[in-house]
Amino acid sequence: NYVEGVEKSRLELRPTIYYKARKFELPAVKVADGFYQNGETYAASTEFYITSKDGFHAFRDLINNDNGVIEDYIAKGFFSGTVPNFYQSNPFTGKTVKLLCDVDEGDVAVKPIGMTTKSPGVTYDKQYFYGIFDGCNNKISNLCVIDDPATADHHVGLFGYVVRDGDADAGVRDLTVENAFVSGYNYVGGFIGGIGGAVSVSNCHLIGFVTL
């Protein structure tokens, strides 16, 4: 099941992925449980695949610099640079992240994907999302995102802040969010709290509450 000469912990050759009732295969490299990319490195990858709730959380943690995911990503050789280098490179510019499963967040409060405030100990900014998130007509249910009243400067939504870098498209498409509760103080949206440039949201549906 592995390619000769490639570290076995990194490369999985054509894992089977189930998308709704239709079975298909994708050549993919495992980044974390339920999270894959279509190249051996970040630079070589144009698409990323989320196949489980754990994979969705790994993607969010990678963008937000949480739970050691970016350090693990670099340690495995996927990105040839430092942690600050990754975030200063405008993460996921020109890349598409595909959600290949439904995700139930269980009404547990979570951070938005893409932070406008720095994580503790972080001395650089730009923990934003610069790519396309393609829901592939799947849904995220029981989403709960609540701003911290102590700071009240976050952009709050499923995605906190999405930026378009030059001619590369950025935004969210083909996604349903059900039973959502999103609450903040300044910049709040169901799908995206704040944008930089011509960011798009298309064929997306939200059922729930978005409050200021």
Image: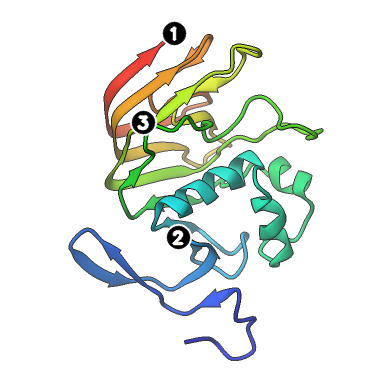
Please provide percent x and percent y for residue 131: 51, 43
- Which mark is drawn over residue 34? 2
Is residue 81 shown left or right of residue 114?
right
Q: Are marks 2 and 3 in contact (CB under 8 Å)?
A: no
Please provide percent x and percent y for residue 81: 78, 56
Q: Is residue 168 depicted above or below 194 in this figure?
A: below
**Nearest the camera: 196 or 99?**
99
The residue drawn where x is 37% and y is 22% is 181
Q: Secondary structure at mark 2?
A: loop
Label 3 neighbour load within 10 Å: few <14, some 14-19, many 20+: some
- Among the two numbered marks 2 and 3 on one chain, the one whose residue lies closer to the N terminus: 2
- Which mark is drawn over residue 177? none
- Separation of marks 2 and 3 at Cα, in angstroms: 25 Å
- Separation of marks 1 and 3 at Cα, in angstroms: 20 Å
Please provide percent x and percent y for residue 47: 47, 58
**Nearest the camera: 128 or 146?**
146
Query: Which amino acid type corresponds to the residue marked 1 in the rendered image?
Result: Leu
Please provide percent x and percent y for residue 136: 29, 49
- Among the two numbered marks 2 and 1 on one chain, the one whose residue lies closer to the N terminus: 2
Label 1 neighbour load within 10 Å: few <14, some 14-19, many 20+: few
- Which mark is drawn over residue 212? 1
Q: Is residue 180 depicted above or below 94 in this figure?
A: above
